[in-house]
Amino acid sequence: MYTKTILDRFQNPRNAGGMHGANAIGQVENSACGDIIKMYLKIDDNSIIENAKFKTCGCCVAISASDIACDLIKGKTIDDALKVSSQDISKILGDIPQYKMHCVILAEESIRSAVEDFYKQKEKATKAAIRKTKRQIQEQQE
Amino acid sequence: MERKIYLDNASTTYVSNEVLNEMLPCFNTIYGNAGSLHSFGRDAMAIVDRARDRVKEAINASKANEIYFTSGGTEADNWAIIGVAHAYANKGKHIITSQIEHHAVLHACQQLEKEGYEVTYLPVDSTGLVSISELLHAIRKDTTLISIMAVNNEVGTIQNIKAIAKIAHDYGILFHTDAVQAIGTLKIDVQDMEIDLMSMSAHKIHGPKGVGALYVKNGVRIDPITFGGINQERGKRAGTENVPGIAGFGKAIEIATKNYIINNKKLKMIREYFLEKLSEKVQFFQVNGHPHQKSNGILNISFYGVDGESILMLLDLAGIAVSTSSACTSKSLLPSHVLKAMNVPDEIAKGSIRISFGLNISKSDVDYVVDELEKVITKLRAISPIQAGRI
């Protein structure tokens, strides 16, 4: 039923597990089948994804697709990572039954969700920095 | 050699030697068409008649001609629902069934809905039992049939068939039960239990696939759903009799009912030993179904924080066959309709597998399965974003 690649990645995922020092964490859930993918990214100052790991509660395809997704985005810039599509993942996994494609799409969405989180964190940091500067200016004026 | 352990006996079973020996002559020695007038045909008919007698004895029907052989449980269910609904359409067009029936019943009901019938799908409680009070509420003047399965195939809960049949008859309604999982599990006595129609299947009880039967009590009207056989099965079910299959079914049901007490004891021992070992090694799981009123052969377990299909696949790689009805396995994506009806939350239903024991399972098999299960669950929980202890 499943290709060798799917079974191999399912049994021995290369990128499974959480990550210490991740600066972007995204989590997506498929409301229909209940699969959940949590994506952990470490993004450096040049917006390059240094490392990617995942935790997935889902079927064979969801786990193997998460694993491939991590492979595909490692070493890429954020912008390039966002270009990774479910088609790219399914091409590597091989023949996937149509009714399982939603699991691959979920893996694609997990990348987006993690990147979103990265920007959110960044925005938060920027806002905090602005607040801090404003406070400093206020203090100086006083 | 890789160890192989089959724990999916609620899906199907192997054909036992006694059954196979009963069938073999029917392929090339007694190969006549049971409908033929000549000696070849008569010999084949004699085999069919003997099997019919065996089924009659096994379920304590009053006459052998109340047994109609079909292509299996699905056809028997389809026929019972649609055939009775059509035959009694003048009386009314309302049918009562439950939310946890097999799809062979549910989809037949949906077909009738398309034809303008109304169907009430009774809810069940958290153990999978149909509530008698809900049933009483659902009964209407135009209700013609109540169909409730005897033993649920996913969780093994046993319904109060006798009580439900009694209520049906108090209101002049016919009662059908899908007993596909019940044969060999329960003592079935159609007269004592007041059953009007009952579906059976051979391959769940070490008989061959592709054969089953519908018991139709004499006096109950049923329209055919197959056409073209004038003399076959009293003109009610068309198609050349599957003589080898019928012979095998007759033998299989005879053995299953003869040994049901001892078989149940064995299955109970295996089940209890399994749960005892599992509790020693694995945390955070629940057994779905009724605590006592259950089939000993069927064990539905939800492991928290993991997905049922992943468990199935990893066990399969260790040579162990179980089944799942979890969301992502089926094309529909929907969680098991049975667990949903029992109000099992989706995230718990997701991690459920069905283990169905056979009589050929030894203690050492159980030890092996539990060891592998522990490894599988540990592995999957390590990569799951959900913490099992928090569910």
Image (tube, rainbow, N blue to C red):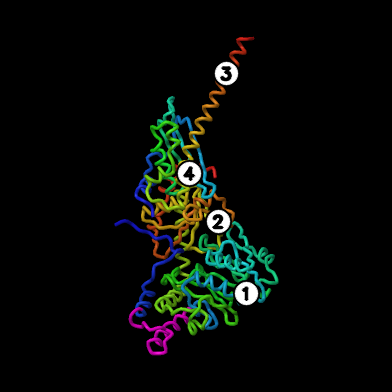
Residue B26's place in the image compared with B299, above or below, is below
The answer for how far apart the CA atoms under marks 3 and 2 are is: 54 Å
Secondary element at image label 4: helix
List the residue tagged with mark 2: B339
Q: Earlier in the sequence, mark 4 or mark 3?
A: 4
Residue B233 sits inside the magenta stretch: no
Q: Which residue is rendered at x = 55% and y = 50% of the image?
A: B346
Q: Are marks 4 and 2 on the same chain?
A: no
In the picture of the structure, the residue carrying the numbered disc 1 is: B174
Callout 2 secondary element: helix
- Picture coordinates of residue B12 (x, y %)? 43, 65
C-beta proximity under 8 Å, tags 3 and 1: no
Q: Answer whether residue A74 is visible to the viewer in this image.
A: yes
Say few, some or many: other residues with alpha carbon within 10 Å of mark 2 (under 14 / 14 to 19 / 20 or more).
many
The residue labelled by disc 3 is A132
| Mark identifier at residue A106 | 4
Let me know if residue B40 is in the magenta part.
Answer: yes
Between marks 4 and 3, how big is the CA–CA gap? 38 Å
Q: Are marks 4 and 3 on the same chain?
A: yes
